[in-house]
Image (cartoon, rainbow, N blue to C red):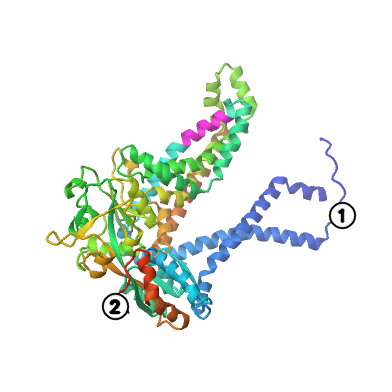
Amino acid sequence: MKNNYFAGLTPWRNGRYLLLLAALWLLVPALLASCRPPESDAGGAVAGASLAIQNKGSDTLVNIALAWAEAYQTVAPEVTVAVTGGGSGTGIAALINGTVDIANASRAMKESEIEDAQANGIDPIEHVVAIDALAVIVHPDNPVSELTIVQLADMYTGRITNWQEVGGLDAPIVLLSRETNSGTHVYFLEEVVRLGSSENSDIFAPQTLLMPSSVGITSELRRNPNAIGYDGLGYVDPAHEKIISVARTVDEPFVAPTVATASSGEYPLSRNLFMYTAGEPEGIIADYLSWIVSPVGQEIVAQLGFVPLTGGE
Amino acid sequence: MTTNVPAPPKAPLPSWREKVIEGLIWLSGVSAVVIMGLIFFFLLREGLPTLGEVAWADLFSRRWYPIEDLYGILPLLAGSFLVTVGAVLIAVPLGLVTAVYLGEIAPTWQRELLKPIIEVLAGIPSIVLGFLGWVSLAPLIQSLGAPTGLTAFSGSLILAYMSLPTIISITEDALYVVPKEYRDGALALGATKWQTIWRVVLPAARSGIVIAIMLGIGRAIGETMAVMLVTGNAANLPALNAGIFFQPARTLTATIAAEMGEVAQGSTHYHVLFMLGIVLFLITFAINSLASWLVGSGSRRRARQ
C-alpha cells in the first residue's frame, strides 16, 4: 500500500507543487502591495504632524524644490523635506489623495481638481513661489530664430507641417512636447495652442511626440534638426539649443526669454509656479513656505535660471 | 520488472505531520488560483466603471488626449499592434534560424560558447536596452531618413532583441527533444541535411516552437519602459503607407506607465487606464489560448497518424 502511495507522487507532480509554492511566494507581496494605498492615505494625513515634509509634483519646479530643501537644512536642521518630481498632475493627484503635504505645480489647479480635492475633504491653498519663462527651442542648425505665437499654434496643431512655411528649410517639423501630466504641457496648450483663449478648443496634433521628461526633449532636440520643443528657461542650455524669440502678434517685437524680460512681462510665455497645501499651512509647513518667498529663498530661484518673485509676497 | 534499489526504510511520518504538509501544499495550490482571481477581480472593479462613464463610440474613437476627456483607444491599440508585429517579424525568423543553427548544425564548441551568451542576453534589464536604443538606435534610424528616430520600428528592434533569447532557448529545447532516430531515419532514406531539418525535425518540434513564439510575443507586448523611451509616444493613428513602421507610436503599456502617476483615484481617466489593463489582459489571454490551441491541435493530429 505504502509503495503505491509514493509511486503516485511522481517527480513531475512534486515539481508542480514546487512551482505553485514559488508562485505563492512571488504573488503574496504583490497582493499586499496592492492593498496598501488606502492605508498610506491615512498615513499621509498625519505626516504633517512629524518633522518631515512630503513635497511632490512639477518637474519644472523639482530642481528649485530640491535646492530649497537642501538649503533649508541649515535654517531648520530638524525638518527634512522629501522632494520628488513626476509632473504637476502627479503632485496635485497626490495632494488630492492626501499623500503629500505640499504639491508643486507649474500651472494653477483646474476646477475639476479642486472639486475632487474638496470631495476628499481637502481644501487646496495656492502659494506662488517663483516665476518661470517657457523657452521655445530648436536645433542650433535651424535657421529659424523668430516665431509668433500664432505660428507656434499652427505648428503644434498640425496646420503647418513644413519648416518652409515659417521661413526655414524644406524639412518636416517634428513636434516635441512633455507628457500630459506635465504642467508645462497644460500651460503650452492654453497659452500657445489655444492662443490664450478659453473658447478655443484646439489640441496638440496627434503626431506630437510626448516625452517623459525635460531631458527627453532636450536630448532629442540636440540631435534632430527638424525638431521643435519647449522647456522651462532654467533647463535650457543656450550652448546646445537655439532659443526662439517669440512675439505675441506680427506687429509686436520679438522678445527672447531672459530673467529681465520674463519678470517685466515683456516675454509672452512666462508664468507663475505654485505650491499647494491641504488647507492653510501650519507649523513647519508654514515656516517653510514663508522662508521660500523670503529674499534668501528667492535668491536660489535666481541662481537656478528661473525668475524670482519681485515686490515681496 | 527491473530491480530498483529498494527505498531505504524510513520512520513512518506521524500522521499529523503528514496532514500539515498536505494542508500547506493544498493551500499554496489554492492560493495561486485565488490570487489570480483577485487580480482579475480588482482589474475589473477598477476598469469596468469606464463603460458607464465613456460611451463605446468615444472609447473606439481616434484621439487619445485624456486631459480633454478624449479617451479613444484605437491609436494605442494600433501602436501596441504595430510595435509587437514589427518585433515578431524580426525576432521569429532570426530566432528560429539561430536555434536551428545551434541545435542542428553548429559544432559543439560553438554551441557551448553561444548558448551562455544568448542566455546572458535574457538577463539584461529592459531599461538598459531602452537606454541603448535611445542613445544609439534612434539617431541611426533618423540618419536613414526618417524625420525622427523615435519610431515604432525602433521599439520593434529593441523588443525583438529582448524576445530573441526566449525564442532561441525554447526552440532549441524543442529541437533537442526530437528523437535522434527521426534524423537518422531521414538521412538513411537519402534526405539531405536541409531536407531533414525542414521536413522532419522542425515539424516534429512544432508545438515547442509555437510555445517559443508565443512566449516571445508575450514578452514583447507586455514590455513597457524600453518601448516608452524609443517609440516617441505620439498617440497617432498610423498612416497606412510604406513607411508604416517608421512613424512614432504610443503603446498601451507606455500609456498606463506614463499616466498612472497623474490620475486622481476614482476619476474617469483612472478607470480608463485600468480598462487598458483589461484590454492588455484579454490580448495576452487570447495569445495564450491560441498557443495552447495550436499546440493541442498539433498533438491531436500526431496522435491520429
| Residue A42 in magenta stretch | no
Residue at 20% across, 46% down: A168
Q: Which residue is mark 2?
A: A311
Judge by depth and name the residue closer to the eye, A230 or B62: A230
Q: Amino acid at mark 2?
A: Gly
* CB under 8 Å between discs 2 and 1: no
Q: Amino acid at mark 1?
A: Ala
- Counting from the top left corner in percent of width and height, residue B23 is at 71, 61
Name, please, the residue furthest toward the left. Answer: A251
Q: Is residue A1 visible?
A: no
Label 2: few (<14), some (14–19) or many (≥20) C-alpha neighbours in 10 Å: few
Rendered-image quadrant of the C terminus of chain A: bottom left
Residue at 69% across, 46% down: A12
Q: Is residue B275 visible?
A: yes
Q: Is residue B93 left or right of A222 when viewed as pictured? A: right
Mark 1 element type = loop
- Counting from the top left corner in percent of width and height, residue B164 is at 51, 39
Q: Which residue is mark 1?
A: B11
Q: Quadrant of residue A62?
A: bottom left
Range of residues picked out in magenta: B92-102
Q: What label does residue A170 carry, if any?
A: none
Q: Disc 1: which chain?
A: B
Front tag of 2 and 1 = 2
Label 1: few (<14), some (14–19) or many (≥20) C-alpha neighbours in 10 Å: few
Q: Main SS type for the magenta part?
A: helix
- Residue A39 vertical position relative to residue A141 in the rendered view, above or below: below
Judge by depth and name the residue closer to the eye, A126 or A46: A126
Inter-mark Cα distance, 2 to 1: 88 Å
Q: Quadrant of residue A261?
A: bottom left
